[in-house]
Image (cartoon, rainbow, N blue to C red):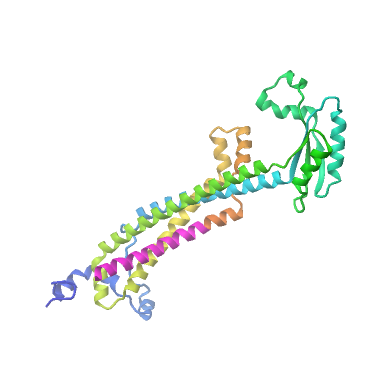
Amino acid sequence: MSTPLGNQSYDDLDEASTGHASDLFAPTREERKEKGGSHGPIVPAGSVTGRSLTLVISIMCFLACLTAGAVYMINQSADAWLRDVASEVTVQVLPQNGADTNRTLQEVAAFLTQRSGVDSTRTLSAQTSTDLLEPWLGKSDALESLPVPRLIAVQVNRDTPPDFDALSRDLATRFQGVTLDDHRHWQQQIKTVTRSLAVGGIAILLLVAAATTAIIVSATRSAMASNREIVEVLHFVGATDGFIAREFEKHFLTLGVRAGVLGAGCAMAVFFLMPLITWFLGGGSMTEIEFHRLIGSGTLDLAGYVLLGMVIVVIAALCMLTSRFGVYRILNSNTD
């Protein structure tokens, strides 16, 4: 007598499915309590979806966490730069023939102090102005004879900053050779670089998500193929597609959480040890200073580690949902 599964007899079916009997039927709650166990999973943990897949997903999560953490640190550092740049503007005083530059500096500083939104002013010495030109012009005694502009650093109120356009016009009208630099150009450059890095980071995360999805789809197909007899017998005894999909979903969710924790843990260790790694690779004190200028301390704060935890959640959810939809698609295609 033939069965709905093919031309096999019921005896052949029973013989073929004997090896998977522990995976087919879930005992009742009372039986589990009496025996102290439960039915085995449909997808064995040691199959193609086991250790090798866990390692691959862990690597994907590691790369995603490194990308997310690096973009987060750079954004934090850029925000600090923008706050510092926005809190101070520079007034440039050009030396004029027959004019007392020091007196002009005092008058400009007094004028700025009386304007609303200005907290304080600090006049830079002539030597400081000369030192600022050394990286471009080199160190030379000839700089002292040049009419180097004098600078006034103006600390502004962040909450109620002055109208920079109006302040620039007033300075140009009241004083000759005096200009205001509100650092808008530098702020725009910092924002542009930060946005570019953020877009690049998002692109990398999308690529990692796409690769993870493709891997899970392939693993789901392999698991379905290797456990085809179990799935067919489950269908024969009345199991629904939802039950089978949930079994695969549980397996891949557990795998995603385990792989996500492993990958995120390695990434956290990298960020935690980043200053030590930089020093071990030969970076001296100057390298450490430049490193701190670029990405701050080089370690994540609490919010950064929370972000890495969110990556674990996303990876686990991606594994679970991809396997669920993959199982439904395979079962529906087999039915058709």
Of all residues, the one furthest to the top in this rendering is 141
* Residue 262 falls inside the magenta stretch: no
Q: Percent from the top left, x then y, of residue 303?
A: 60, 55
The N terminus, quarter of image: bottom left
Look at the picture and state if 127 lies above or below 277: above
Return the residue nearer the eye: 137 or 302: 137
Of all residues, the one furthest to the bottom in this rendering is 30
Image point (36%, 56%), residue name: 214
Look at the picture and state if 35 lies above or below 65: below
Image point (57%, 36%), residue name: 279
Look at the picture and state if 176 lies above or below 262: above
Image point (82%, 41%), residue name: 121
Q: Percent from the top left, x then y, of residue 12?
A: 15, 72
Which residues are the magenta region? 310-336
State the image quarter where residue 135 is shown.
top right
For the question of whether residue 147 can be seen, the reply is yes
